[in-house]
Image (spheres, helix red, strand yellow):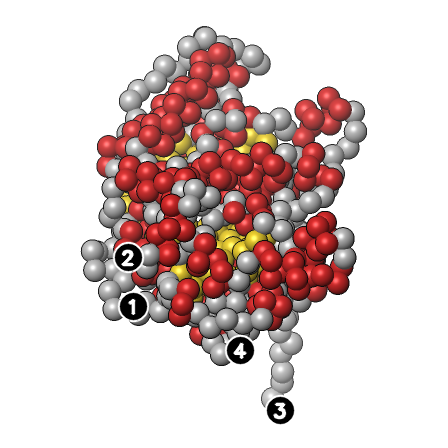
Amino acid sequence: MTGTVDRPAIDVESMLDATDWLSCPKCSILIYRRRYDRLAMVCPECGAHGRLTASERLSQLLDPGSGKAIDPAPSVRDPLGFADLVRYTERLDKAVARTGLTDAVRVVRGTIQGRPVVVAAMDFQFLGGSMGCAEGEAITTAAEAALSDQVPLLLVTASGGARMQEGVLSLMQMAKTSNAMAALDDAGLLTITLVTDPTYGGVAASYATLSDVVIAEPGARMGFAGPRVIEQTIRRRLPEGFQTAEFLLGHGLVDSVRQRRELPHVLGVLLGAGTPPGADWGAGVPDRVVRSPGKVVPQPVERIVGLARHRDRPTTMDHIATWVSGFVELHGDRSGGESLALVGGLADLDGLPVMVIGHQKGHTTEELVHRDFGMPSPAGYRKAARLLQLAAKLRIPVVTLVDTPGAHPGLEAEQQGQAHAIAECLRVMGGLPVPVISVITGEGGSGGALALAVADRVLLCENATYSVISPEGCAAILWRDQHATHAAAAALNLDGRSLLSLGVVDGLVPEPDGGAHVNPVLASEWVRDAVVCALRELRGQDAVRLVAARRQRFRRFGTGTLETERAGR
């Protein structure tokens, strides 16, 4: 007779060391540590981004084997002989022993997606990433290395603010690092900040927010004063999500919020903005633009107005999706505002870095409402001006796509300075030392359209319009009759044939039979070809002559000079 022996069930989890598991600090789910490491310390359940050390951050971002350390000059260690409950030197010694670092910043040369870059990565484990003399020296050294190498600078921030134990010398690091960033501006070198949790105080109020592009990880907090200080000062609770990356994005204070896994690709696209293609760029692209009014078949103006407003015409984002292989949208005016009616960002157009800016409507009622029907607030135009200035700094061409009934006319828009925001765009565009191409793809309504159309070449899609006011507005004001819209539209000469005759636009971009909405992809490809041909003509032109010619172009309007030139053709 064979007997059986009862064996206890095997508890697999008990065989694993407790250190093999961890609890997400946000949702408390248990995560297998090796899986958590593979996910770059991002919770698979709630998406919370855990803190990385400087070394872990560099490993995640840089191409393998590309990082080469840069050693900053020695800094004063304890300038005040400071002591609180313990001596400051003891705190430093413990931080060095715990982290293996000599200060809270690691500086390296390396590549991301094959693009050269200097990176300064902060480590919150070293005294909360606070900024003392050594940290200010490290950031400044990183900026100087980028300047010497003529490559972009990437800053990865994680800091509680200035280091109190170093007193006013810590405060001086804010000015020191800000001056270093200004030198990179003068040299036309791209600067990027990656905001990680947390970034506060003197770091946020200096180099962290001075970069051309500010990207934040989800949930990362940034601000000058911490939430506890603010609550104690104002004596009320702060709103949910205050100072988080998502809050900052909605208030125009950061350009983008990106998942950790996206960062190498996004940074690679941004770093490519300073790499122009060869002289033969754009060769072979057909030039379909119609430049003679006599070659334009007259159409009923009411038909053109209807087609210009058709919901299925390609939007700016549709054009971008058709044209470019890489696009990083940049948000916000950095002054507390964002307008979804105007979009823009750095793009790769067949290997040519360009800044694309345009009005954004939508195809559905929900999207139109969400985008304010393509009517930007002052924050939208301030964002546009910021991106235009970035294009000038990086010496890359600008392409603007115009499709708006006009600037937003609301109470808040007026309170926030709509007129000045538009005026600033006009001034900035007029003086850009880079080629500027504007295409009116739908409605070109009033100053809200012109704010993006002070260009070297202004093109108009075949069934687009451009006018000082809408036909409805003109009929109501001058005819005092809402039924006089068609008469007003005809009188305003807002169609392509009339605009070519006036010299306001330089050419018409043909559309598929029936209008751009019939074949949006083909219509977008033809606009792209027109832009490429215009850029091909203007690339390499002397900046001073480019600005002078652009200003002269607009100087002639209304003098009869341009009309006489047109008549002689």
Q: Earlier in the sequence, mark 1 or mark 3?
A: 3
Label pair 2/1, CB-CB below 8 angstroms: yes
Pointer 1: what residue? 285
Q: Looking at the picture, does residue 356 appear above or below residue 299?
A: above
Q: Residue, x 65% and y 58% (percent of image)?
A: 488
Q: Looking at the picture, does residue 455 appear above or below residue 318?
A: above
* Mark 3 closeness class: few <14, some 14–19, many ≥20 residues within 10 Å: few
Label pair 3/4, CB-CB below 8 angstroms: no
Q: Secondary structure at mark 4?
A: loop
Pointer 2: what residue? 536
Q: Is residue 87 left or right of residue 286?
A: right
- Quadrant in which residue 293 is drawn: bottom left
Pointer 3: what residue? 1
Outermost residue on the top side: it is 81
* Mark 1 closeness class: few <14, some 14–19, many ≥20 residues within 10 Å: some
Label pair 2/4, CB-CB below 8 angstroms: no
Q: Looking at the picture, does residue 478 appear above or below residue 55?
A: below
Picture quarter with the C terminus: bottom left
* Mark 4 closeness class: few <14, some 14–19, many ≥20 residues within 10 Å: few
Mark linked to residue 514? 4
Q: Amino acid at mark 3?
A: Met
**Which numbered disc, 2 or 3, marks the residue closer to the eye?**
2
Give coordinates of residue 469: x percent, y percent: 62, 51
Q: Amino acid at mark 2?
A: Arg
Q: Residue, x 48% and y 12% (percent of image)?
A: 168
Q: Amino acid at mark 1?
A: Val
Q: Is residue 326 left or right of residue 51?
A: left
Q: How far apart are the two marked residues, 1 and 3, measured between alpha carbons?
A: 90 Å
